Image (spheres, grey):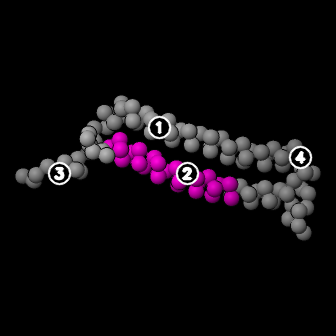
């Protein structure tokens, strides 16, 4: 019979889910994810609303054939990348909180 490797045992997920640390982790993640999602959703639908209700504004030429609408549409990619980059930065904190949460008692 193999010896039990205590370092690689599966955590007690019910204990983890009921812990204050897990609730804190969810709250910290929610503080980033919800505002980022709402901002991008408003940004995305803002372009659609401008297209529907302010076509003259978004058809203003900025440079040559490039209009404000094209720039706003392309800026959505940039905003998406920025949000992804910010999430990657925040994820290091989420990972640290997760490791602390899953560490055996007395170890961090």
Q: Splitting the image into 4 quarters, where does residue 18 fall?
A: top left
Q: Give the secondary structure at mark 4.
A: loop
Query: Which one is earlier in the sequence, the residue at label 1 or at label 2?
Result: 1
Give the label, 3 or 4, closer to the camera.
3
Residue 90 rendering spot, x and y as whole percentages = 52, 50
Please tell me whether mark 3 sits on a helix, a strand or a loop: loop
Q: How many neighbours does mark 3 have within 10 angstroms: few (below 14), some (14-19), or many (20 or more)?
A: few
Against 31, residue 57 (above or below) is: below
Say if the magenta span includes residue 86: yes
Contact, mark 3 vs mark 1 (Cβ under 8 Å): no
Q: Which residue is mark 4?
A: 54
Q: Which residue is mark 1?
A: 26
Earlier-in-chain disc, 2 versus 3:
3
**x and y percentages locating residue 35 in the rendered image:** 62, 40
Q: Separation of disc 2 and disc 4 at Cα?
A: 32 Å
**Label pair 3/4, CB-CB below 8 angstroms:** no
Q: Which residue is mark 2?
A: 87
* Cα–Cα gap, marks 1 and 2: 14 Å
Residue count near mark 1 (Cα–Cα under 10 Å), binned few <14, some 14–19, many ≥20: few
The residue stretch that appears in magenta:
78-102
Which residue in the structure is indicated by mark 3? 5
Secondary structure type for disc 2: helix
* Sooner in the amino-acid sequence: mark 4 or mark 1: 1
Closer to us: 89 or 1: 89
Relative image position of residue 21 (x, y in whole percent): 39, 36
The Cα–Cα distance between marks 3 and 4, rounded to whole angstroms, is 65 Å
Q: Is residue 28 left or right of residue 71?
A: left
Query: Measuring 63% from the left and 58% from the top, which residue is drawn there?
Result: 81
Report crowding for label 2: few under 14, some 14 to 19, many 20 or more residues within 10 A (C-alpha): some
Dividing the picture into quadrants, the one containing residue 39 is: top right
């Amino acid at each position: 019979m193999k010896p039990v490797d205590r370092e690689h045992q599966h955590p007690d997920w019910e204990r983890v889910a009921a812990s204050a640390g897990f609730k804190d982790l969810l709250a910290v993640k929610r503080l980033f994810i919800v505002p980022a999602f709402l901002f991008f959703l408003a940004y995305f639908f803002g372009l659609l609303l401008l297209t529907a209700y302010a076509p003259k504004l978004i058809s203003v030429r900025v440079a040559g054939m490039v209009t404000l609408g094209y720039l706003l549409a392309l800026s959505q990619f940039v905003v998406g990348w920025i949000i992804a980059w910010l999430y990657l930065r925040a994820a290091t904190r989420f990972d640290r909180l997760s490791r602390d949460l899953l560490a055996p008692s007395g170890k961090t």
